[in-house]
Image (tube, rainbow, N blue to C red):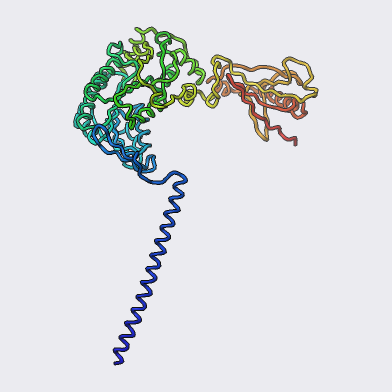
Amino acid sequence: MMATTKRDHSSQSHWKRFTLIHTALHGYALLTRLYLDCLSRFLESKQAVVGLVQKRFSHDLVVSPKTGRIIIRQGAGGRSSTNGHVVTVFGCTGFLGRYLVNRLARDGAHVIVPYRDEDDMRHLKVMGDLGKIIPMEIHLRNKDSLEAAVRHADTVYNLLGRDYETKNFSFADVHVEAAGVLAELAQKHDVDRFIQVSALNARIDSPSRFLSTKAEGEVLVRSIFPSTTIVRPSLMYGQEDRFLSRLAMSRGLSVRINGGNTKVRPVNVSDVAGAMFKMLDGANTVGETYELVGNKEYTYKELLDFIKDITNLDIGDVNVPKPIASLMAKVLNVLPWQTLGADEIERMMIDDKLTGAKTFEDLGVEPTLLEITGIQYLRRFRTNLYNDEPLKKGVVGKKKIFHTSYLAPAGSAAGSSGGSGSGNTLAFDPRELTVDQSKFRVGGFAGQPNTIHSSQSGDVDSNESSMNDQPQSSEQDEAREKRQERFMGLLHSGALGTPKIEHQRPGTVFTLPVVKPKLM
């Protein structure tokens, strides 16, 4: 009997304990659910403020009118989201290609980058998020490798092109045959968009083989893929271009063709890449032709003058006749590295002309001015003397003047004393100027004690280092010490007034304060 009572009491105590634990867990679950609900509402309110709410809208779902393929955009935008597109960019390792890949990857597209040399595409892998850049090795004469790069894409950009012919590939091989093969593969695998990059002034009857084959490629691609979008950019400039850089490096000796009178409309490569990115989802761009040019026309002579103003290079005015330039280009093509081609000489004789096709304006893109962006691409051609100098026209060919001017205070004896020049101006050789808090040394000046005026002008070149390296005699050292003592006496007496250093370079003046040493 006692055993049964103990057993009942034990079972009741266990049941009470179980009930308490169950009630506590239930209450904890309710509190947790309430906390999570409040937290989610709080985060939604915060995200609504900054525009980060992850919601699906009707415009996030796009149905291809050609194939019925569903393209779904996910994420808030940017490289870590996805815009639903799988894009293949042939010619991605070229000048325009790297800018286009970067623009596509920044929007979250999966980009297939076909390549021939692995080293040429390594810099493209970091342009997109993990797994968004897919490298695939190809060869233009291996159709299976090309098909593998096209098979899973919904958009194909063909940027393949060569400025000069090689022993392996001619203009026709790249601009016509390869373009036709890619169009056939895009049509075979139901690719939604095929965007072909041609060139401005492309005509079948053009004297340039580059331009004529580009026109043939346009006709062939349109016959195979009727909804192809044709893009005809003008000469493009940028960080790695072969246009402005060549003009700056050549010093005018290889580009003054046709007397420098050929008219061109250069365009920024970033503007072209941005316009081509807009064609990805632009239904109104299907089957259209676009001529992407800069908003200002220049002659080669004007461009060379512009480069002079920016770089301060002494670019020559040598005009090379076309036959001689073509012969020189053919000889240079024998070299194993890239040089100026004979067909490029032919293109330098052709003015840029629009045919009435659509332009940047139809895409809502405003091209940048060369005068605004040119400095960032040409600054690297400046010497160390002009690297930080602001842009100012009309400075080439002038002497570089270095002088120090000391403005005497109003009413001082020094300011009213006579002499040559206006005010108290001290001119000296800047190669002998050193400024130190403890040792203030200035040498190389000459003149009267109160009114000291001289001029020291001349070109700064590589001979300065050799002049400074020459041994100095004891007489020269003594003369320099005397000049320094005279200057320090004038400075300490206050006769020179407030000092300032004017370092006048061509077209600009920098005024630097000089610390007046304390008298011990």
**Rendered view: 53 above or below 32:** above
How many badges with numbers are in the image? 0
**Rendered view: 402 above or below 516:** above
Q: Nearer the viewer, residue 49 or 141?
A: 49
Residue sitting at 38 percent across and 26 percent down? 363
Residue sitting at 32 percent across and 82 percent down? 11
Q: Residue furthest bottom?
A: 1
Q: Nearer the viewer, residue 478 or 106?
A: 106
Residue 404 relative to residue 356: left or right:
right
Residue 365 relative to residue 384: left or right:
left
Tell me residue 308's x, y (percent): 50, 17
Q: Residue furthest front?
A: 58
Indicate the quadrant where residue 268 lies: top left
**Rendered view: 477 above or below 264:** below
Q: Nearer the viewer, residue 59 or 400?
A: 59
Tell me residue 520's x, y (percent): 75, 36
Indicate the quadrant where residue 457 lies: top right
Residue 16 relative to residue 434: left or right:
left
Task: Name the image quarter holding the N terminus.
Answer: bottom left
Q: Is there any visible trace of residue 168 in the rendered image?
A: no
Tell me residue 183's x, y (percent): 23, 26
Indicate the quadrant where residue 292 lies: top left
Q: Is there any visible trace of residue 390 in the rendered image?
A: yes
Q: Nearer the viewer, residue 74 or 41?
A: 41
